């Protein structure tokens, strides 16, 4: 399995289509959106980590470059989006390899921490990859109408230590929409 780190401006039409097709397979409820875009809520990835098997995109994670406010601190976070493992590749511990490659690259690029949102059922998957739950923090995002609103309650927030080891106290303002 080949792991590639590809900056967004280097993703050609063929690769873009392959990623979108896989997103539609892995997230059928959001297939209408992913058939046209990978920029969830308008947040395009700065780069992607892609695992290929003989040219097939087997797994993917997109990383959004965002500065957020945590309490009184500004942090540059590597926002995780569009994580998938194609169904035929699941059960091979690819998620850990994928996420490790993404966070190694984020550290190399000088990010303070990784930040992701997921449903509670995925907490154990990401915890196995070194991510930590951020309980009790209100996460504020700016929606499509410019309103400051909380992150939907169906989501939990997790972080990965990079330049910082502990996430600062206080609520988190994403200073934009979620990704």
Image (spheres, helix red, strand yellow):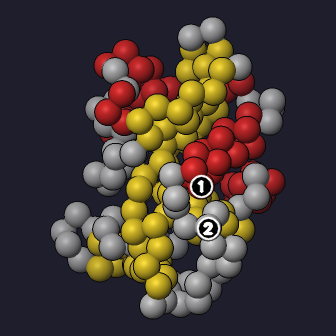
Q: Are marks 2 and 1 in contact (CB under 8 Å)?
A: yes
Q: What residue lies at 56% left-to-right and 11% top-to-bottom?
A: 55
For residue 107, side relative to residue 96 (left or right): left
Question: Residue 101's spot in the image, x, y percent?
Answer: 65, 41
Query: Is any part of residue 115 visible from this angle?
Result: no
Q: What residue lies at 58% left-to-right and 84% top-to-bottom?
A: 168
Disc 2 is placed on an element classified as: loop
> Which mark is drawn over residue 163?
2
| Location of mark 1 (residue) | 107
As drawn, 139 above or below 53: below
Disc 1: CA contacts within 10 A as few (<14), some (14-19) or many (>=20)? some
Q: What residue lies at 58% left-to-right and 61% top-to-bottom?
A: 114
Query: From this viewpoint, which residue is outermost toward the left?
Result: 145
As drawn, 135 above or below 78: below
Q: Nearer the viewer, residue 148 or 167?
A: 167
Q: Nearer the viewer, residue 134 or 88?
A: 134
Question: Residue 84's spot in the image, x, y percent?
Answer: 59, 37
* Quadrant where the C terminus is found in the figure: bottom left
Q: What residue lies at 46% left-to-right and 31% top-to-bottom?
A: 6
């Amino acid at each position: 399995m080949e792991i590639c780190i590809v900056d967004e401006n280097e993703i050609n039409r063929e690769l873009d289509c392959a990623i979108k097709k896989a997103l539609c397979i892995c997230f059928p409820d959001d297939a209408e959106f992913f058939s046209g875009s990978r920029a969830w809520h308008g947040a395009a990835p700065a780069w992607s980590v892609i695992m290929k098997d003989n040219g097939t995109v087997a797994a993917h994670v997109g990383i959004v470059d965002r500065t957020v406010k945590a309490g009184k601190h500004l942090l540059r976070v590597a926002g995780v989006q569009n994580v998938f493992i194609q169904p035929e590749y699941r059960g091979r511990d690819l998620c850990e390899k994928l996420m490790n490659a993404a966070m190694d690259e984020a550290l190399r690029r000088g990010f303070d921490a990784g930040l992701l949102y997921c449903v509670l059922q995925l907490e154990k998957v990401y915890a196995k990859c070194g991510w930590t739950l951020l309980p009790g923090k209100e996460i504020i995002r700016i929606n499509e109408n410019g309103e400051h609103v909380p992150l939907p309650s169906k989501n939990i927030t997790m972080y990965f230590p990079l330049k910082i080891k502990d996430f600062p106290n206080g609520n988190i303002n994403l200073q934009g929409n979620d990704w």
